[in-house]
Image: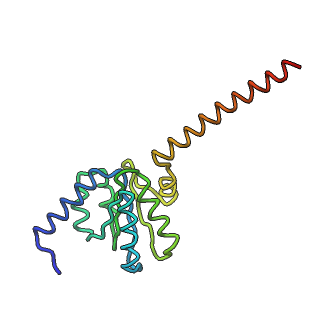
């Protein structure tokens, strides 16, 4: 079904609004992936606050104007599945990398984070960034380890002083 002018404007406005709020974006080629698998990917994305769209490049280019992801306009070619990370910058990258491991035909193309186009190594680095909760947990464990270490040193020192 062809889209009329008003529907196209609505799509552009919707994607633009999401792009303005997003922390990072990643694109992939979905052409050899079954629709059911993409629907499963969309369900997983919804749980982690990632918005996924398959949209024509002309509409996508218009919707990315005046956003942090305008650099993507120059390199968009072929079919694209685009994902916007809304809460954590690495969540969409993490999702795509996990999906890529199970689906070899799923090719990750580009990603943009902090106004920089990322290569595949940088996309992997972005995907491994800890979330806020993971960072707090690591920090808490580090504090516990430091405190326990001081206590053990103190006990060792006391034990050797009394001899």
- Residue 124: where, in percent of width, then height? 51, 57
Is 6 placed left or right of 58 in the picture?
Answer: left
What residue appears at the point 79 percent right and 26 percent down from the top-left corner?
156
Is 162 placed left or right of 51 in the picture?
Answer: right
**Quarter of the figure with the N terminus:** bottom left
Count numbered badges in the picture.
0
- Residue 96: where, in percent of width, then height? 44, 65
Q: Nearer the viewer, residue 94 or 74?
A: 94
Is 35 above or below relative to 113? below
Is 153 above or below relative to 90? above
What residue appears at the point 19 percent right and 65 percent down from the top-left corner?
11
Is 107 placed left or right of 54 in the picture?
Answer: right
The scheme the figure's colours follow is: rainbow
What residue appears at the point 19 percent right and 62 percent down from the top-left corner?
12
Q: Quadrant of residue 25?
A: bottom left
- Residue 97: where, in percent of width, then height? 48, 64
> Which residue is situated farthest in the right direction here?
163
Q: Quadrant of residue 73?
A: bottom left
- Residue 70: where, in percent of width, then height? 29, 55
What residue appears at the point 49 percent right and 75 percent down from the top-left corner?
103
**Quarter of the figure with the C terminus:** top right
> Which residue is situated farthest in the top direction here?
162
């Amino acid at each position: 079904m062809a889209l009329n002018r008003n529907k196209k404007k609505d799509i552009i406005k919707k994607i633009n609004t999401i792009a303005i709020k997003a922390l990072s974006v990643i694109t992939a080629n979905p052409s050899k992936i079954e629709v059911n698998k993409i629907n499963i990917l969309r369900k997983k994305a919804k749980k982690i606050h990632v918005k996924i769209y398959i949209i024509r490049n002309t509409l996508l280019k218009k919707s990315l104007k005046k956003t942090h992801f305008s650099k993507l306009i120059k390199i968009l070619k072929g079919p694209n599945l685009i994902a916007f990370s809304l809460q954590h910058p690495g969540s969409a990258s993490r999702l795509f990398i996990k999906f890529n491991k199970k689906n070899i035909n799923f090719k990750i193309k580009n990603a943009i984070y902090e106004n920089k186009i990322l290569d595949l190594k940088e996309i992997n680095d972005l995907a491994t960034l800890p979330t806020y909760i993971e960072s707090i947990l690591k920090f808490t464990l580090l504090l516990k380890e430091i405190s326990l270490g001081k206590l053990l040193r103190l006990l060792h020192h006391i034990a050797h002083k009394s001899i």
